[in-house]
Image (cartoon, helix red, strand yellow):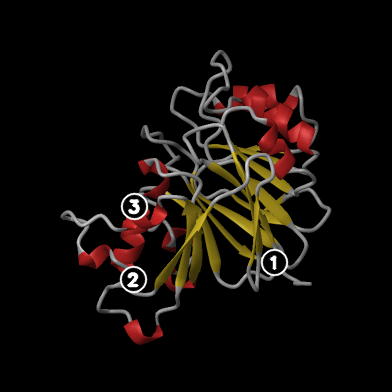
Amino acid sequence: MSSTPLELIVLGAGAALPGRGRGPAGYAVRGGGLVGVTLLDCGPGSIRSLADRGLDLLDIRRVVLSHFHADHVLDLFALAFARRNPNLDQDRLPEVELIGPAGLAELLSVRQAPFDLWTRDPRHRVTEVFPDAGVGLRLERADVVLEAREVQHTVGALGWRVQAPSGASLTYSGDTGETPALAELARGTELLVAECGLALDEAPEMHLNGAAAGRLAAEAGCLGLVLSHFYPHVDPALAVAAAAEAYAGPIHAAVDGTQLLLEPGQAPRPGT
């Protein structure tokens, strides 16, 4: 068991359209016995914001992707470009594992300028996952257990659960409509990070609104809920209030830089 809490650091709490204080999707997870940093999605601006959040580029050990929309994956290329910089000792560069749905290897093989050889990371490995419908998938690594379920968005879109050696876990929805698969994935987790791309008068079919996120959190029995991935037209305060009608636990409206600490069996608490 690790003595350090599992920590979520929000790199981007917004979506494809620009919003004040909320960039495109990106989340960093560390502590709890994890080696280095795991990124959940890597949208534009994720890599630029690492230093602002006290994170080191060379601490990144894996990037876990939910789906291939540009606001979730574009900084994969920025990550590779940064890691190839001649100011870094290439012989001591740690390997990064890139994990995502089928098609990830093809995405990384783009060979048109500006995505040339400088955006080919020489020390990465690709893991494509194929969850069984209704069952999901489990990946075990030395420092983490990752579970995935297909969610209701693009073909092959995934929600992910991160289980640390400490025993604490968090579940990340990716982009999804209201689906039982997400509640099943998040069952008993310390924290559900749920996208909230829709206003309350929009049907939660391909994205969630605050009310739908609250219902899913209540069904999952998680110990805390973070609403994120806000589009500019979504009022975070209204989203939190709507979620609270269904879910009695603590609810946070994420902004870039939000930090939460997770201990097994305890509600998340703000980081410093």
Give the percent coordinates (x, y) of residue 69. 39, 40
Q: Nearer the viewer, residue 192 or 118?
A: 118
| Residue 83 numbered tag | 2
Residue visible at 54% across and 16% down in the picture = 202
Secondary structure of the residue carrying numbered label 2: helix
Give the residue at x 46% y 44%: 67
Q: Residue furthest bottom?
A: 91
Instruction: Give the spatial CA distance, label 3 vs label 1.
Output: 31 Å
Q: Earlier in the sequence, mark 2 or mark 3?
A: 2
Q: Give the mark nearest the N terminus, 3 or 1.
A: 1
CA gap, disc 1 and disc 2? 26 Å
Quadrant assignment for the C terminus: bottom right
Reply above or below: 95 against 246.
below
Specify the amino acid type for callout 2. Arg
The residue that label 3 is drawn on is 107
Amino acid at the residue labelled 1 = Gly
The quadrant in which residue 32 appears is bottom right
Residue lying farthest right?
Answer: 265
Q: Earlier in the sequence, mark 1 or mark 2?
A: 1
- C-alpha distance separating marks 2 and 3: 18 Å
Quadrant the N terminus occupies = bottom right
Does 84 sit left or right of 233 as displayed?
Answer: left
- Mark number for residue 32? 1
